[in-house]
Amino acid sequence: LHKVNIVISFLTPLIEPLIPLAQKDDILLIALTIYPGVVNNPVTIRIFYDVYSESQKLTEFIKEKLKLKTIAFIRCNDPASEYQVREYFKPMLKEAGINVFEDITFAFREKDFKKIIKPLPENVEGIVILGFGIDFPGVLKELEKYNYLKKKKILGGVGFWEVPQEFPSELLENIIFAAPAYLHNLSNLEFYKKYVSIHGKPPYYISPYVYDNMKILFHVLKNFPYKDIKGKNLKSKIIELKEWDGVSGKIKILSNGDSRVEISLYQYGKNRELKHVK
């Protein structure tokens, strides 16, 4: 890495080993991950989907709209989900007067959900599922055996946007989940139209965040002396922006290099019709 000034990386397992190397050579590390813990150093910036806002949106909905008193988590044990539940979700739920009966965890690409998911008490009114969409079919199939998809309110994070297309759409119906705010209007974005005209296919849901990171980087690099292009300097300059109006929506850049982005709630209808929940 000593030959470059800036590194852009995707996914937490790839980003974490890069952090000490980037710090050593004062390289800006642009982290495309939902895990907020990666910014706890002088050279890493994270402008991406935001699990703080996701937790906040879901907590407000659970309290104000659903009026649930007790929920359970079923989630992946990856660093982002661990951090989200510990640092954001549980404190928010506690403040809202909502009890967490159980925090059930599973490994990424878990093969046997029978040993993990067991019957829940009647007073558990809702289940929040977090992690990667590739694992959710196994979770939902097991919940269906207990008739929980009908008996309890099922909510979740952005992983529901990534559930494999071959999974039966009827098992996804009525699940409330958080995802980027721009999704309900994506096809009307100028970015979407240009992307399709160039690539011949719709953008992946994270593409607007990647585009915004590049625009922010180019904005900061404009008229930036080459000798000063160092990780700490660039991170400081990006933080100084404080806000950015991007194709993904309004972005708030925090003093530690993390971000807050616009999140909305959605619900799948028949055949995966995406409905915006207001």
Image (spheres, rainbow, N blue to C red):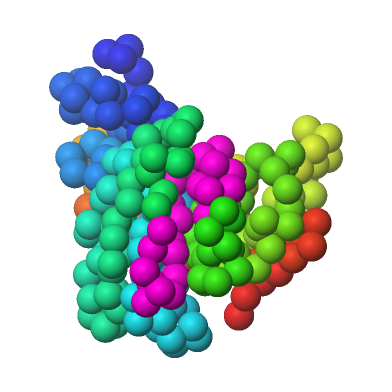
Q: Which residue is found at the position 22% from the left and 70% from the top?
A: 91
Image-quadrant location for residue 6 = top left
Q: Residue 10: give x, y in percent of width and height.
A: 44, 32
Name the side, left or right, on which 196 lies relative to 46.
Answer: right
Name the side, left or right, on which 18 lies relative to 197.
Answer: left
Q: Is residue 136 magenta?
A: yes
Image-quadrant location for residue 202 = top right
Q: Is residue 199 above or below residue 208?
A: above
Q: Is residue 84 above or below residue 26?
A: below
Name the side, left or right, on which 16 lies relative to 157.
Answer: left
Q: Which residue is found at the position 28% from the left and 48% from the top?
A: 82
Q: Residue 196: give x, y in percent of width and height.
A: 80, 41
Instruction: Spot the residue most to the top.
Output: 3
For the residue pair 51 and 203, the one nearer the viewer reads as 51
Q: Is residue 208 above or below residue 124?
A: above
For the residue pair 202 and 151, the one nearer the viewer reads as 151
- How many dots with numbers? 0
Report if residue 225 is visible in the image.
no
Q: Residue 227: give x, y in percent of width and height.
A: 27, 26
* Quadrant assignment for the N terminus: top left
For the residue pair 24 and 276, the one nearer the viewer reads as 276
Q: Residue 38: give x, y in percent of width and height.
A: 26, 40
Q: Which residue is found at the position 57% from the left and 67% from the top?
A: 176
For the residue pair 141 and 27, the one nearer the viewer reads as 141
Image-quadrant location for residue 122 = bottom left
Please provide the residue range marked out in magenta: 119-143
Q: Is residue 32 magenta?
A: no
Report if residue 231 is visible in the image.
yes
Q: Which residue is found at the position 53% from the left and 48% from the top?
A: 142
* Quadrant assignment for the C terminus: bottom right
